[in-house]
Image: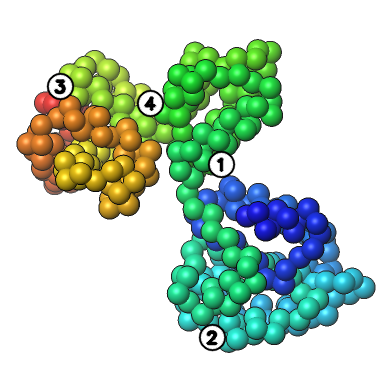
Amino acid sequence: MKRIASDIKERTFSRIYLLFGEEAYLKGLYLKNLLAALDCGEDSMNYTRLSGRNIRESDIIDACETLPFFAERRVVLAEDTGFFTEKTEKLADYLKNIPDYCVLIFSEREADKRGKLYKACAKYDRAVEFAKADENSIRNFILSRLKKEGKAIRKSTMETLMDYCTDDLAAVKSELDKLLSYTADRQEITPDDIAAVCTVNITGRIFEMVEAVAAKNREKALSEYYSLLALKEPPMRILYMLGREFNQLRMVKELAAEGLGRDAIAARLSIHPFAVKKAIPLAGRYPSETLLSAAEDFAAMEESVKTGRIADRLSVELMIVKYT
């Protein structure tokens, strides 16, 4: 990322850029700034944008071979082609001798680092992976934005705000925008501000339901459920996610008992370390037998709904009542 930022600042550009990964917001921001530095407006005669899996290797090569019109460079952007997860010998070989006047930018969701095309791009030292943001990245993103806007936030309030965040920076930015607008006339952000305008994502609400169940707080758990129904969340999806949460707690508890740390558990279960951080103390409130039984009960309840033996809305209510 630093090399791309430096290129933008110094206006000295590589012939190849590869921006890839699941973090769409940050990847899009770097791409936008790079294109702006290259003076690539949509009406530019020296800018070609190719997008989608229907484009061919030859389409990219032909665009790169087209001489710039009264300009020093031609810019070619290839987005979401899927080439970096496929065998693309022709394009990989072409990149070895791409014309000096061409700047070719790839923006992809996935890239196989073992592939010939990835390795051909990596030689230009501008292959950047934008992975899903971790807890520290999200926290730094929020603090940086608040500092820029002249806002103050207490540590405890920040923890409250983090509970509303996903690992999608675009969603985090959206929540921040609402919060900043709501507190336009005040410097400090409070928990009441967060509760007033921020939206808890469904995963967060499910976790709150499980916490309420663990605390034997039936009223709160049912209240969270009815709030999700009011937001048009299908009962069957809520049932599935509740069952998945209990099963995840079971696995977190087992791995923690084996001595694995937070990051190791996250890697083993392919979940976010922040989710593991929240799950470990909650899993400790349940006996292992209860978590195993819950996972089996939710699976059985799903089957009962699918076969029409019980109504979907009632199924969730029954499971909440049983485990509170």
Real-space Cα distance between discs 4 and 2? Answer: 52 Å
Task: Report the quarter where the N terminus lies.
Answer: bottom right
- Vertical arrangement, residue 235 with respect to residue 178, above or below: below
- Check disc 3 and report its element: helix, strand or loop: loop
Name the one closer to the observer, 264 or 23.
264
Q: Which residue is mark 4?
A: 230
Q: Which residue is mark 1?
A: 170
Q: Nearer the viewer, mark 4 or mark 3?
A: 3
- In terms of secondary structure, where does tag 2 sit? helix
**What residue would you read off at disc 3?**
324
> Which residue lies under the disc numbered 2?
89
SS class, disc 4: helix
Name the quadrant containing residue 261: top left
Q: Position of 251 compared to 1: left or right? A: left
The image position of residue 195, as x and y in percent, is 47, 18
> Which residue is most to the front?
259
- Which comes before the other along the chain, label 2 or label 3? 2
Label 1 to label 2, Cα distance in Å? 35 Å
Work out how far the residue at label 3 is from the one at label 1, CA to CA, in angstroms: 36 Å
